[in-house]
Image (tube, rainbow, N blue to C red):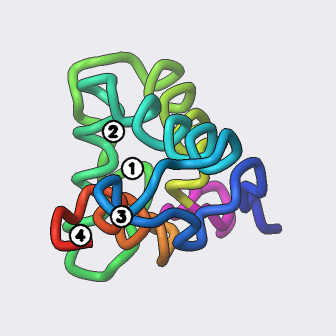
Amino acid sequence: MSEQSTAVDVTPCCPSLTQRELTVGEAESMAAMFKALGDPVRLRLFSKIASHPDGEACVCEIADVGVSQPTVSHHLKKLREAGLLTADRRGTWIYYRVTPSALAAMAGILDASG
């Protein structure tokens, strides 16, 4: 059973901030991603998944961020809703991966070289 999020399209939607002014839709899309990463626990979870050697991580491998398991689940859900993570259920565990274009989209908008 797949638990992939489809809340936000994270294809590289937006030009560099120095290239041109963002449209309302582009700004909303990118703001959702940056807002999701604005919480220290979410940022740590995202980092644990993004830097995991296998490119994906079981929730059992990343839950040690100093908050309860239900809170970890809440934060992972927010990251999925922002389009930053995808998830697959395998038996009783859920495995998370960074959405392939999420990092490129965020890096692209901040690229000063335009």
**Residue at the limit of the structure toward the front, as seen here:** 20
> Sequence-wise, which precedes: disc 1 or disc 4?
4
Which residue, given by chain and number where applicable, does mark 2 sit on? 63
The answer to whether residue 91 is magenta is yes
Depicted 114 relative to depicted 4: above or below: below
Amino acid type for the residue under numbered disc 1:
Cys
Image quadrant assignment for residue 35: top left
Q: CA distance from mark 3 to mark 2?
A: 39 Å
Q: Looking at the image, is 70 positioned above or below residue 7?
A: above
What label does residue 60 carry, if any?
A: 1
Q: Residues within 10 Å of mark 4 (few under 14, many from 20)?
A: some
Q: Secondary structure at mark 1?
A: helix
Q: Which residues are magenta?
A: 86-96
Cα distance between the residues tagged 4 and 3: 33 Å
Earlier-in-chain disc, 4 versus 3: 3
Q: Are marks 2 and 1 in contact (CB under 8 Å)?
A: yes
**Residue ID for mark 3:** 19
